Image (cartoon, grey):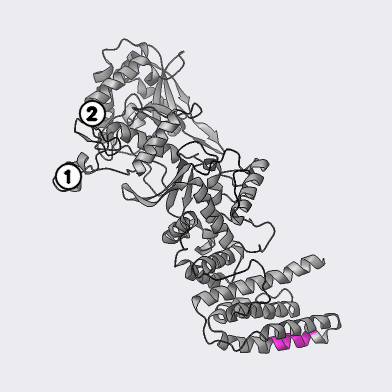
């Protein structure tokens, strides 16, 4: 199903005139420099093809003959490769291997190109045989050239030599000579055809090897089972193999807007036909709607507002067709989550459904976590990444628990319960940092609403009588009284008692109430703050009337409700203060 969906997506892309997708036998690869040759094979110049992005130059994506798959062996690419193969020079300090690489590149070029009278091909052959490459070492930019991928161009002629008709004909001969003639029934096409043994490498997966990894591969005899040859363990035709890997590499491209990273998982998504959801779904995972990200800026204010309107409608369970023109809710949508596993990929997540049902589940997620914001500049619809970094030590992406990240993505997209470890992880982070902020309160609310079927309001609920919620409110009032008595104090009761008060209230609250009585007594002595003391007495008594006793312990779920009560009450204090101003 996965390979078939990717194959179909490739064919959809080939019909789109606005998409530059490689055809069979070619690939889009990172190329940094072009060797400009004279007709006699002399080196005229080295052309820098890199693109300036920010402060760095990045290789340009060019369509070249499809690369061979290599790990440790010597296998040259056709009319392009890195400096070790093309020039016989590298900076890795392995002269014997470099010599073998360059020799293999020269032999392959002569074998398949020597019978051509094309000026470009003849220039490459003369360049390789007459050792004109030694001049490159004298260039000032040699340190930038060494180790990069190179192509050839004929001086005074537009285009690259590998794109010339004669070079393409030679490439077809080279491909035909290396075709594995093992035939069988293709899993995707259903017809008998040549099967692919080694599938092209996939690049762009978070944590994967820079040279690329495989989704399907049987490159050793030890991978054979039940006496079947390598190609028959997962029989996929060579054409279908090229199509599904090309489509997946297109989705995994550096600049792709259909790829997001969640913990150690890379998630890609696409539709069976063109759909606006492909362009904005990434914002729900990675880039906050209300903010701009340096890596993925949202410059179009109209687009930003439209996405916000869409999310508001989704959260309310309304239809979204009128908000995003062209959004057909019946279109099938696919989501694929990948993680590296040595030299192969693990499929962490796979979901396919209509875009309408997918957006409805995303709307349920935002409805479940909806809670009043602590500050007005915080995102009303926090992205999954923003939520997850608030569960990680030091707020760093690399510290996000992979299992938690995958479970959160699955819950958001599939409508399943949130991961069981979400509650203890958030509570642990609050105890460690002493800060039940907006994002953590949203996660706690979502867990209690979806997993425990509790009713939790977005704002302060003064009528709620749950012991844990009331205790959280009481703790917030006692803390605020301390802050008013001792302004700008370096540490409040939150820093010392928040964790223990939420876990073992009976051991802590008697001490807190005793200290609070002293704080309020000091307020009464100040003529300007006497009314404050009355208000705190009234507020504490109002909350205490809802308590029967102080429980010895609170369960994890009740501790989560305690933190929400604390968060609601704290927010209410400052909301009222701002409204009065």
Work out whether residue 165 can be spotted. Answer: yes
- The residue positioned farthest toward the right in the image shown: 527
Residue 6: where, in percent of width, then height? 38, 39
Task: Tell me if residue 115 comes above or below residue 213 in the rendering.
Answer: above
In the rendered structure, the answer to whether residue 307 lies left or right of residue 395 reads right
Residue 198: where, in percent of width, then height? 26, 38
The residue carrying mark 1 is 221
Residue 391: where, in percent of width, then height? 51, 63
Task: Tell me if residue 448 comes above or below residue 267 in the rendering.
Answer: below
Say whether marks 2 and 1 touch (CB < 8 Å). Answer: no
Which element carries disc 2, helix, strand or loop?
Answer: loop
Quarter of the image where one finds residue 105: top left
Query: How many tags in the picture?
Result: 2
Between 397 and 2, the one lying in front of the other is 2
Task: Tell me if residue 125 comes above or below residue 449 in the rendering.
Answer: above
In the rendered structure, the answer to whether residue 344 lies left or right of residue 544 reads left
- Residue at position x 47%, y 36% from top? 273
In the rendered structure, the answer to whether residue 292 lies left or right of residue 251 reads right
In the rendered structure, the answer to whether residue 288 lies left or right of residue 451 reads right
Q: Which of pointers 2 and 1 lies earlier in the amino acid sequence?
A: 2
Residues in magenta? 516-523
In the image, residue 307 lies in the stretch drawn in magenta: no
The residue carrying mark 2 is 179
Between 7 and 256, the one lying in front of the other is 7
């Amino acid at each position: 199903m996965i390979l078939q969906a990717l194959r179909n997506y490739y064919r959809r892309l080939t019909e789109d005139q606005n998409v530059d997708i490689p055809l069979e036998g070619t690939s889009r690869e990172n190329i940094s420099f072009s060797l400009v040759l004279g007709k006699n094979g002399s080196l005229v110049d080295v052309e820098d093809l890199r693109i300036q992005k920010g402060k760095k130059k990045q290789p340009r994506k060019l369509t070249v003959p499809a690369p061979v798959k290599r790990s440790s062996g010597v296998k040259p690419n056709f009319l392009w490769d890195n400096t070790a193969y093309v020039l016989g020079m590298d900076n890795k300090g392995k002269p014997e291997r470099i010599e073998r690489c360059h020799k293999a590149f020269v032999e392959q070029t002569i074998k398949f190109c020597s019978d051509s009278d094309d000026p470009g091909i003849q220039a490459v052959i003369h360049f390789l045989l007459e050792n004109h490459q030694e001049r490159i070492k004298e260039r000032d930019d040699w340190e930038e050239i060494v180790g990069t991928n190179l192509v050839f161009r004929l001086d005074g002629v537009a285009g690259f030599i590998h794109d010339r008709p004669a070079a393409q004909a030679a490439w077809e001969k080279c491909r035909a000579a290396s075709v594995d003639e093992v035939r069988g029934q293709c899993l995707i096409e259903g017809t008998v055809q040549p099967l692919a043994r080694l599938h092209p490498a996939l690049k762009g997966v978070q944590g994967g090897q820079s040279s690329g990894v495989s989704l399907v591969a049987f490159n050793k005899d030890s991978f054979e089972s039940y006496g079947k040859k390598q190609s028959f363990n997962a029989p996929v035709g060579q054409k279908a193999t090229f199509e599904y890997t090309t489509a997946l590499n297109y989705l995994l491209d550096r600049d792709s807007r259909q790829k997001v990273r969640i913990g150690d998982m890379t998630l890609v998504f696409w539709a069976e036909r063109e759909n606006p959801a492909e362009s904005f779904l990434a914002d729900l995972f990675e880039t906050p709607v209300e903010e701009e990200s340096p890596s993925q800026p949202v410059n179009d204010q109209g687009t930003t507002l439209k996405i916000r309107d869409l999310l508001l409608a989704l959260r309310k369970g309304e239809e979204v067709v009128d908000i995003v023109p062209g959004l057909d809710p019946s279109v099938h949508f696919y989501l694929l989550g990948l993680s590296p596993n040595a030299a192969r990929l693990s499929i962490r997540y796979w979901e396919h459904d209509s875009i309408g049902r997918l957006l409805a589940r995303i709307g349920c997620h935002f409805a479940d976590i909806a809670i009043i914001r602590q500050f007005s500049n915080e995102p009303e619809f926090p992205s999954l990444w923003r939520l997850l970094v608030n569960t990680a030590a030091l707020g760093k992406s690399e510290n996000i628990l992979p299992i938690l990240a995958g479970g959160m993505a699955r819950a958001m997209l599939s409508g399943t319960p949130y991961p069981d470890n979400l509650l203890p992880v958030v509570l642990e982070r609050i105890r460690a940092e002493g800060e039940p902020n907006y994002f953590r309160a949203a996660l706690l609310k979502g867990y209690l609403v979806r997993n425990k079927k509790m009713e939790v309001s977005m704002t302060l609920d003064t009528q709620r009588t749950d012991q844990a919620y009331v205790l959280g409110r009481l703790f917030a009032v006692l803390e605020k009284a301390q802050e008013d008595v001792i302004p700008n104090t370096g540490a409040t009761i939150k820093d010392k008692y928040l964790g223990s008060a939420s876990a073992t209230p009976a051991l802590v609250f008697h001490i807190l109430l005793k200290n609070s009585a002293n704080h309020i007594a000091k307020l009464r002595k100040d003529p300007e703050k006497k009314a404050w003391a009355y208000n705190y007495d009234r507020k504490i008594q109002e909350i205490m009337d809802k308590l029967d006793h102080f429980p010895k312990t609170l369960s994890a779920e009740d501790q989560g409700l305690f933190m929400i009560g604390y968060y609601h009450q704290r927010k209410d204090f400052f909301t009222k203060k701002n409204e009065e101003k």
